[in-house]
Amino acid sequence: MAEVLLPRKMEIAKDPSKFGSPHLLHVLAVDDSHVDRKFIERLLRVSSCKVTVVDSATRALQYLGLDVKDKSVGFEDLKVNLIMTDYSMPGMTGYELLKKIKESSAFRDIPVVVMSSENILPRIDRCLEEGAEDFLLKPVKLSDVRRLRDSLMKVEDLSFTKSVKKRELETENVYSLDSSVHSQLKRAKI
């Protein structure tokens, strides 16, 4: 019996989205500053999140498979629940990354949080209007990360609950269909 249960436990650990466990939320953190990347990574890990860090918006697009030229290999099965990006980065800004993600049909529903050490209201407004979930001022605090995590968990739990109810209804419909087909067969004596 124990051997049968072990693979199920492993399967649960591989798919965090289905079970709404906070320690399995997967966050993609994007920042060109090594110090800031390490800091946000530590905050997210302390908050029981799985973290992937990249050093540029271009690398984030590669990781997500949105960069056609240098498409990443092997990450297609990973589910990202949240993207946290710095605003000011060389090459492509966090705002441009946000726009590309929101234009993508595959990733537009993933919440994106933009971070910046500069409190510039037009920049904040522009990011929020483009679809950012939140705009955090650096240094990001542990309370910010926990608030985001808790908010995401509510959304994940709601989505999980809806999918379970949908499956229950589908199963119920199949069984009611089977019984009506069975009674029709009985009447026809087949």
Image (tube, rainbow, N blue to C red):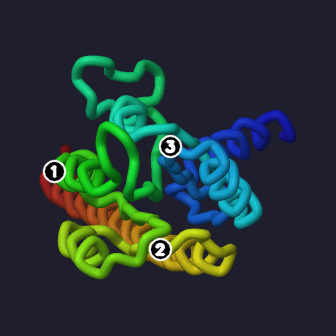
Mark 3 packing: few (<14 Cα in 10 Å), some, or many (20+)? some
The dot on residue 103 is 1
The dot on residue 32 is 3
> Which quadrant of the figure contains the C terminus?
top left
Residue in view at x 71 percent, y 66 percent: 47
Precedes in sequence: disc 2 or disc 3:
3
User: Distance between the Cα atoms at labels 1 and 2?
Assistant: 22 Å
Q: Is residue 178 visible?
A: no
Left or right side of 29 for 120 = left
> Which quadrant of the figure contains the N terminus?
top right
Eye-nearest disc, 2 or 3: 3
Residue 42 pos. (x, y %): 73, 56
User: Distance between the Cα atoms at labels 2 and 3?
Assistant: 16 Å
Residue 155 pos. (x, y %): 43, 74
Q: Secondary structure at mark 1?
A: helix
Amino acid carrying mark 2 in the image: Leu
Residue 136 pos. (x, y %): 47, 74
Q: Nearer the viewer, residue 62 or 170?
A: 62
Precedes in sequence: disc 1 or disc 2:
1
Location of mark 2 (residue)? 136
Precedes in sequence: disc 1 or disc 3:
3
Mark 2 packing: few (<14 Cα in 10 Å), some, or many (20+)? many
- Total numbered labels placed on residues in the image: 3
Q: Nearer the viewer, residue 173 or 143?
A: 143
Q: Are marks 2 and 3 in contact (CB under 8 Å)?
A: no
